Image: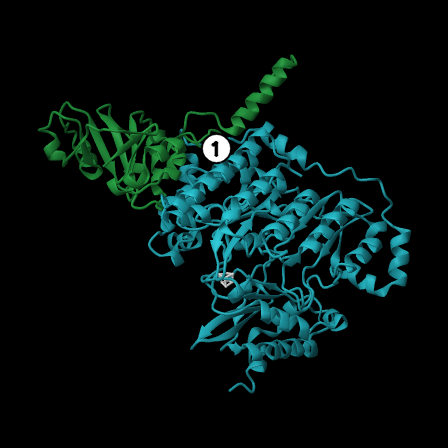
Chain colours: A green, B cyan
Amino acid sequence: MPIIRKGIFVSDHWHECALAESVHHHRDCIVPFDGWIESRARGSRTGEAGLGILVGPQVCAESLQDFDPQVQLVVIEFSSAGDGRGFSLAGYVRRAGFTGEMRARGPLTPEQYPHLTACGFDTVEVPEELAQRHGELSWRRCFGAYPNRYQSALGTRASIVQQRVGDMDSRAAQRGEELV
Amino acid sequence: MYRYDEFDHAFVHERVAQFRHQLQGRIDGTLTEEEFRPLRLMNGVYLQLHAYMLRVAIPYGTLSSVQMHKLAELSQRYDRGYGHFTTRQNIQYNWPKLRDIPDMLNELAEVEMHAIQTSGNCIRNITCDPFAGVADDEVEDPRPLAELIRQWSTLHPEFSYLPRKFKIAVTGSPQDRAAVYFHDIGLRIVRNAAGDTGCEVIVGGGQGRTPVVGKVLAQFVAKSKLLAYLESILRVYNLHGRRDNKYKARIKILVNSLGLDEFRREVELDFASPGGHHPDLDESELARIEQYFAGPAYLRLPAHNARLAAALATDPAFGHWYKQNVMTHKVPGYAAVTVTLKNPGGIPGDATAAQMVALAELAERYSFSELRITHAQNVVLPDVRGDDLHRLWQALGEHGLSEGNRGLITDIIACPGLDYCTLANARSIPIAQTIAKQFSDPQRQREIGPLTINISGCMNACGHHHVGHIGILGVEKGGQEFYQITLGGDSSLSAQLGERLGPGFSANEITPAIEKLVDYYCEHRSEAETFLQCVRRVGVAKFKDVLYANYT
Ligand code: SF4
């Protein structure tokens, strides 16, 4: 399925398989969340290559933590464009300190792209049919939409509120006032 | 009133540009109707029975004269010369052309208005006490918090695809005029023992098919923590609310199925989580917003006004209107005036372009250019000098706006019903019109006293029938419209849902049925007892017996 990063369609090297199988691969593998969490409980490792975890929309949010350094990718599934659970799950992953790639997978539209990036997603993976209809142009256009938002969320940009406050601080500084 | 800064302006303009682009996508076929639908809904565009409908947000019901002029202008340029004010303090245009909507939104943006999130499974327009900032019983003006919540909820990246719509109301007064017990989240500004103001948080109230009175989730949340607390509630709901059945998807169902204690535990777990994502509530930001609501430049006036007293003494019609439609103001010498959009025989909540212009001009002249829209589908001029009241009333009369029926039996709340709405089972508007005509005699209305009739055209309860002292619900049986009556509903702090009386009545029978209930009350009330008090004392069963005595 096509993958979009920063508004551009990119190719992908990740391979999807069961956890048991991933042990024999030297490639980077995406494994289901359940298998990963069980193996982690038993303390077993899965080989040298990078590990990706596939998180369904039903996964218990509190279990999204303790990502060891081998985990380089977290894929969060959206069952439909209207299934907003993934937006909240993303927050748990980021708050647990995961700094690797976070990917949204499902029948999502470019209009949702700004929300996805604001929630900390790096890449989006959409079904072939959707990618045909909403080409790179649409994704690229939406990538830059709403540069300023009211929420700081998990994106990197300062929110409108932060900018306002910063603005006031700098104006105060210009007037030689002390910052409070 | 709040004024946009450059960020707010840029944001709504960007939103308009986005919508224009989305509409283009729909026209050229890159967006399917299925994909376009949620996008247009999130921007307030519905497909009704006969046409598209645009719902414009009036955040917490506050409008300036300039904005009201614009609403009038839009109704003339793009619609049929009128607008419909709704029970959620919004305005709806019933006949715009889809291709004109981006231009309408653009004009709205110029006067700092928008249609963002007036529909869709997201956080909807924040509603508020229409007397915010002027009521004399207020702990604090709730509008700064409402504005803060408006901004925070606008295109919230995490909460734009909720299981279902989400409604938040805020009140700053112990008298509940915002129906906080009937919202997904209701906030009451309260003062704690230390003298600080914060919010009591009520959750899981609502009307619709499963009406529920909200429950207190937290007795006191400090303002600095409020957005974080709201985020925790929304997060628990977003993750755990049902998505398999739209009739079971509202937060009230989740709260009921988990139980209030378990729901609270989940919320507090998230709220307390270390490294938790606590959104911005910078105190300087709240202070920045608050300064916009400091209030107009009131004059020092005597509390007693000779001109007003003289007019009251000599003009009894004015006196009746004054008694019913004028509320005391926190500032001596001023009054808050309700202009009802409820001419008996008219459509509840409808205002013509000429009436909107008149209201805008009268607000300019008499009320510091400010207006409010109430959830009872009326308009408030919040800051009128006592000595201007008589002149204002006369001027209102020239536009058919001087009906002195606020809170009386003809001040009916009604949803659009089958005349417009695709979901409707029955018409609401003609029923409201017939009942109002039947009781149009002002003398009789005053004798009956406070009585609200609320009418919905289907179970979705947009006409708030569950909380009407008399509620009327339109249902369909064998291709015919029937109307079920509920009794004893109340949306104030003594919140209660009405009880259904029995089998429905046809459109022709419903007005006589209401007559029977009212007559029974008039005959059996004890002195000074209101309809609702009488129902509570005598019991719903008694009224039911009377209503169905000769029923076949
Ligand atoms: S109550 Fe029903 S008929 Fe009335 S506006 Fe709502 S959905 Fe439409």
Q: Quadrant of the N terminus of chain B?
A: top right
Horizontal placement of A63 versus B33: left or right? left
Q: Amino acid at mark 1?
A: Gln
Horizontal placement of B103 versus B523: left or right? left
Task: Tell me which corner region of the image, top left, top right, bottom left or bottom right, holds residue A100.
Answer: top left
Residue B124 seen in render:
no
Horizontal placement of B50 versus A112: left or right? right
What residue lies at 74% left-to-right and 63% top-to-bottom?
Answer: B403
Chain of residue at mark 1: A
Q: Position of residue B191 (x, y in %)?
A: 62, 41
Residue A103 seen in render:
yes
What residue lies at 66% left-to-right and 14% top-to-bottom?
Answer: A175
Which residue is the extreme one toward the top?
A176
Q: How many marks?
A: 1
Towards the viewer: B16 or B413: B16
Q: Which residue is tagged 1?
A: A151
